[in-house]
Image (cartoon, helix red, strand yellow):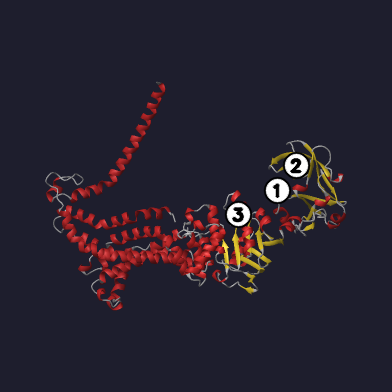
């Protein structure tokens, strides 16, 4: 019997420490998710509902509505489309250019590459605020429609401006991300390709690029989220209301007299949905890229 | 098919007084179809030498010639040379077929059909046909090794360069691949330079071996010549396992002296060789050291027999490696037949036959006298 008692004692001890562990974990999760939950709860309440209850409480009986979501969708839909039109090219462009420059700075050997790398790294730490004025002046001086003589350029000038700006400002961080990955590529493999007769461009196209899928996932997710969530450049560079992106539109959901919290919360979720979709789509590759697998 | 010449090849890393000389004035002439093994300890410059031949490193001084043409300035792609790397360096995202096709696609104008044919042929020769559609990640170490070889062979280059290609394999597979590689090189008859730090590979595989130390070429010779006629003390110590015994001695009255325990009288050629020298290193291979537990070893002159104590016996199966200490003298290692029973701690008599000794200048390390090969059997190579 005593052995059974011993076992019971051990199990009880294990149970207690387990229970404590789970309690702590649960508390941390609750703490972390509380703002999300509050937002979600508020977004499905009527105006009377969110005034009568605390933010994290579920909607009281009869005060449940999806109206705020509907309004949010209606008022943000143009912004969502504009944001996609702007963010996708910007993300793809900065990832591709970042990959190319990282290849040139990591796997090729040439004089002065350290100096160039230092410039890229400096670019990572450049605060957006510090370039707002020169950036505005630069784009005022550039006449995009006459530079790119295509019909649609005129009506999307604000978006193209914003997209190109984000692409350019994304290159340094993308380069640094790709570089750390390319530094782990087997150098002998690149040398083998050189001996096999491949040029630097061919090695990039046939060896390096196909092996970059995981790091592309990381960079695309990171860069897409950055570009999508930006408000500062969007406010400064886009003046035409038809070119308004979703972050600016979301900002305008704030009423000037009455704060419609349910609408703002629903709007925030609507605006955040695409970044969530991107994570889900590239999640597996993302994990691989972060873990540094090749 | 090509003759490969290294003419005073030198590689310096860095400039000015801080420059590190990795390879110093190396001269080797590798005949068409020859298998040359470049051997030496880590950091001796053997890989750098190979990489200079491949075009992966620039040549600081001297000339690399392929069939009489200087190729220093040619890029790796323009040298018609294939290399097998230690890490195999396969392209992980391509199938074995893709790996083997890559070089042909990039360096030749062959059409798809001809490339396929070449790949199939090479795969059949290496017995990897069934692996063609797999990716490197799904292959074992030995299989990857074969694919790496296949990728080099399929291009039919003028010369193969191999950088420690067997060092990632386990011991058994390594000795099997050693034989196979030799066979393959014999069949293809392509000039090959093979880099290794493993003296067994150097001894068994090469037509000739080039021994490098600290960037300097020590000796280029057939394996047996390097073994029996080492140019200097470094070669003598590097080639052979267990390595040669070295005893630091002084020359007194025509005898080598290392303490009271070892006074070794010299006669004939050996005595002439040390005339004028005062500090000499005596070298003798472990298999030449005679050990006897009762009485003197039979075939050694009595003046060349000494008292000794057996410290440790390492049984290898086919032989025993016996570590001995001479009282007031040096330590020696001997190998004796595996069936002989010798116990640790016992006293023994040790004979060093006069015809088996090597003598080296203690300062320069140069060989003054090498062992006599008078009793070599008729089928022994002419060295």
Residue B360 in view, yes or no: yes
Q: Which residue is tagged 3?
A: B177
Against B137, is B10 above or below? below
Q: Residue at x 17, y 60 (%)?
A: A74
Task: Tell me the crowding category of disc 1: few under 14, some 14 to 19, or many 20 or more residues within 10 angstroms, Cα based.
Answer: some
B162 or A101: nearer the viewer: B162
- The location of residue B308, given as percent across then percent down, is 79, 40
- Subunit of label 3: B
Sequence-first tag of 3 and 2 = 3
- The location of residue A187, given as percent across then percent down, is 51, 61
Can marks 3 and 2 be said to lie on one chain?
yes
Number of the label disc, if any, that sits on residue A293: none
Q: Are marks 3 and 1 in contact (CB under 8 Å)?
A: no
Q: Which residue is tagged 2?
A: B324
- Which marked residue is nearer to the observer: mark 3 or mark 1? 3
Against A141, is B360 above or below? above
Task: Tell me the crowding category of disc 3: few under 14, some 14 to 19, or many 20 or more residues within 10 angstroms, Cα based.
Answer: some
- The location of residue A247, given as percent across then percent down, is 24, 61
Q: Quarter holding the N terminus of chain A?
A: top left
How far apart in space, not on screen, are marks 3 and 2 (Cα)? Answer: 36 Å
How far apart in space, not on screen, are marks 3 and 1 (Cα)? Answer: 23 Å
Can marks 3 and 1 be said to lie on one chain?
yes
Residue A117 in view, yes or no: no
Q: Which residue is tagged 1?
A: B242
- Which marked residue is nearer to the observer: mark 1 or mark 2? 1
Sequence-first tag of 1 and 2 = 1
Label 2: element kind: strand
């Amino acid at each position: 019997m005593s052995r059974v008692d011993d076992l019971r004692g051990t199990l009880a001890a294990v149970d207690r420490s387990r229970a404590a562990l789970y309690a702590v974990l649960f508390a941390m999760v609750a703490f972390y998710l509380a703002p999300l939950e509050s937002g979600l709860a508020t977004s499905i309440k009527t105006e009377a509902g969110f005034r009568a209850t605390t933010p994290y409480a579920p909607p009281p009986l009869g005060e449940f509505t999806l109206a705020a979501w509907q309004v949010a969708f209606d008022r943000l839909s143009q912004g969502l489309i504009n944001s996609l039109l702007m963010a996708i090219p910007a993300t793809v462009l900065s990832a591709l250019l970042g990959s190319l420059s990282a290849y040139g700075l990591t796997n090729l050997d040439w004089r002065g590459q350290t100096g160039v790398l230092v410039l890229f790294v400096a670019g990572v730490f450049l605060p957006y605020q510090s370039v707002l004025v020169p950036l505005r002046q630069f784009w005022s001086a550039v006449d995009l429609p006459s530079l790119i003589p295509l019909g649609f350029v005129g009506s999307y000038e604000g978006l193209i401006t914003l997209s190109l700006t984000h692409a350019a400002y994304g290159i340094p961080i993308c380069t640094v991300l790709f570089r750390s990955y390319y530094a782990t590529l087997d150098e002998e493999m690149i040398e083998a390709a050189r001996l096999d007769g491949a040029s630097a461009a061919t090695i990039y196209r046939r060896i390096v690029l196909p092996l970059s899928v995981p790091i592309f996932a990381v960079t695309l997710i990171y860069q897409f989220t950055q570009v999508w969530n930006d408000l500062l450049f969007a406010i400064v560079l886009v003046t035409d209301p038809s070119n308004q992106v979703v972050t600016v539109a979301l900002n305008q959901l704030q009423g000037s007299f009455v704060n419609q919290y349910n609408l703002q919360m629903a709007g925030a979720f609507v605006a955040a949905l695409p970044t969530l979709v991107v994570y889900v789509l590239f999640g597996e590759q993302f994990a691989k890229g972060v873990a540094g697998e090749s | 098919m090509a003759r490969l010449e290294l003419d005073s090849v030198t590689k310096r890393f860095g400039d000015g007084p801080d420059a590190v000389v990795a390879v110093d004035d190396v001269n080797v002439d590798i005949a068409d179809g020859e298998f040359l093994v470049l051997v030496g300890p880590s950091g001796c410059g053997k890989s750098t030498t190979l990489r200079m031949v491949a075009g992966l490193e620039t040549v600081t001084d001297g000339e690399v010639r392929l069939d009489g043409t200087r190729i220093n300035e040619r890029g790796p792609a323009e040298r018609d040379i294939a290399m097998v790397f230690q890490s195999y360096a396969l392209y992980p995202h391509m199938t074995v077929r893709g790996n083997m096709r890559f070089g042909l696609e990039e360096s030749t104008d062959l059409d798809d059909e001809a490339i396929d044919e070449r790949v199939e042929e090479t795969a059949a020769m290496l017995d990897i046909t069934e692996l063609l559609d797999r990716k490197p990640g799904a292959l074992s170490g030995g299989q990857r090794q074969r694919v790496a070889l296949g990728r080099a062979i399929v291009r039919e280059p003028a010369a193969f360069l191999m950088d420690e290609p067997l060092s990632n394999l386990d011991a058994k597979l390594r000795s099997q691949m050693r034989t196979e590689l030799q066979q393959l090189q014999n069949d293809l008859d392509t000039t090959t330079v093979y880099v290794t730090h493993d003296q067994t590979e150097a001894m068994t595989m090469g037509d000739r071996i080039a021994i490098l130390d600290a960037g300097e070429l020590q000796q280029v010779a057939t394996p047996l010549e390097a073994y029996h006629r080492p140019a200097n003390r470094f070669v003598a110590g590097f080639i052979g396992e267990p390595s040669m015994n070295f005893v630091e001695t002084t020359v007194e009255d025509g005898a080598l002296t290392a303490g009271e325990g070892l006074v070794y009288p010299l006669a004939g050629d050996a005595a002439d060789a040390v005339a004028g020298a005062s500090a000499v290193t005596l070298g003798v291979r472990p298999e030449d050291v005679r050990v006897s537990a009762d009485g003197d070893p039979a075939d050694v002159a009595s003046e060349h027999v000494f008292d000794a104590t057996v410290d440790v016996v390492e049984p290898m199966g086919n032989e025993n490696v016996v570590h001995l200490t001479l009282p007031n003298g040096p330590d020696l290692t001997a190998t004796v037949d595996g069936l002989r029973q010798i116990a640790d701690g016992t006293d023994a008599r040790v004979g060093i036959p006069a015809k088996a000794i090597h003598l080296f200048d203690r300062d320069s390390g140069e060989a003054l006298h090498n062992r006599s090969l008078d009793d070599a059997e008729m089928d022994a190579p002419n060295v």
